[in-house]
Image (cartoon, rainbow, N blue to C red):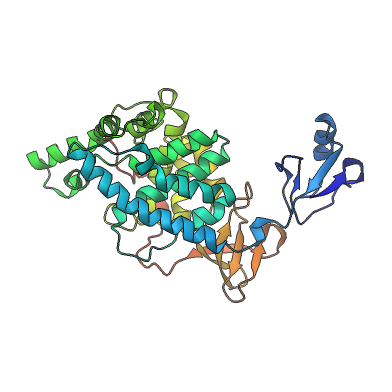
Amino acid sequence: MKSLEQSALEIGEVFNRDLVDEHGDVLLEAGRYVSQRFLQELVETGRDIVFLAPTPTSLTPYSNSIVRQVRGALGNAAALVQEVGMRLSSGQSMRLDEVDAPVRQCWESIDSDPCAALGTALADSEDDVEERFRRNMRMSTMAMVAARHLKFPTEECKAVGRAALLCDVGLEENALRFDELPANSQERDRALRDFLQHPVISSEMLQDGVPGISQLELILVCQVHEQCDGQGFPRGLRRHHMHPLSRLLNVVDTFTQLTDLSPYGQGLMPSDALAYMVLHALYGTFDLSSVQALVASAAIYPVGTEVMLDDSSYGVVMRSAGEDYMAPIIRLKSSEEMLDLRSSDRKIVAPISDRLAWQRLSKARLDETLWKNSA
């Protein structure tokens, strides 16, 4: 990496690569100008030298090897979740390394390029694996990316990934469809009771059937559907009684449910779902820092979203740009050029989609509860 003396930096100067410290941690993101405050912070922290990062990953396409690795993890995980549920429910056990394999595989990709891992995980699937079993690995990927952004230790990032992958092993098909059963019927009441208890059932199955699974993972599985305002289930915990990673996992689970195109989800446009969750975080339903981490990891127009620009051109969001939520890095569909909207005059005017099943969220529905909870 090329070194730069702090004394040589000028106020107003803009670099097309990140300025980083000796460990590679970003001090000033590419495209942001050098401010007086930034120079003062360098002096206060005793940094006489900063470094110009290598060509930014943000302006390169996804690595084919990472795409293959994440797709492989997704496919393996979908089959694994189904197998774990069947084996544990029949009293069999599984080794921890068996259930951990897709998480390890995905974490390697996240550690190399989190946006590439996230973009691949959220892309359309190309096989016929049932969506219910695929969504858990998507949750796992999103949770690990967001936990990494929040600077949780590596082992805790992996733990939330495993919890996301395995949190529904005790969820029966009939319980999942409780709202389709006749109202005021014993069958519906039984299915609803099973649905509200499935986090506890899943945790108990994993504790009994997967020797070596951590106490943290069992807590996260139990608390995945708890919400900060106490309206979640099974125990109606409030924010201060929830593990910080449980609060994050609930945010990821809700986003997945809101955007899910299967019969179990709401099928909302991802950008609308994120905006909706930001609003409800301000209401106190979700943990605000967790929602902010999800937005910072995925951008308001999440990775993989097709967008229209103000010059009527089209692109695909490839990478988030940290706190510049509205200015991600996109790939123009006409030229395949990578464009950093932080340093461009062009702006996104609307998300678009060729997935006709996706719905836009009207303002009239912003205050509705659009996810399944104890109510």
Q: Is residue 110 above or below residue 247?
A: below
Looking at the image, which residue is at 52% across and 42% down? 146
Q: Is residue 53 above or below residue 154?
A: below
Residue 110, position in %: x, y? 53, 49
Which residue: 38% across, 26% down? 215
Front-lying residue, 108 or 365: 108
In depth, the one of 59 and 237 nearer the eye is: 59
Q: Quadrant of residue 218?
A: top left
Q: Residue 350's spot in the image, x, y percent?
A: 53, 63
Q: Residue at x 40, y 40 (%)?
A: 162
User: Which residue shows up at 35% across the image and 45% down it?
Assistant: 368
Q: Residue 18: x and y, percent?
A: 74, 50
Q: Is residue 92 visible?
A: yes
The picture places residue 333, in percent across and down from the top left corner, at 56, 73
In depth, the one of 305 and 74 nearer the eye is 74
- Is any part of residue 299 visible from this angle? no
Choose top left, top right, bottom left or bottom right for residue 210.
top left
Q: Going by the picture, which residue comes out furthest to the right?
A: 7
Left or right: 268 with respect to 317? left
Left or right: residue 149 compared with residue 274: right
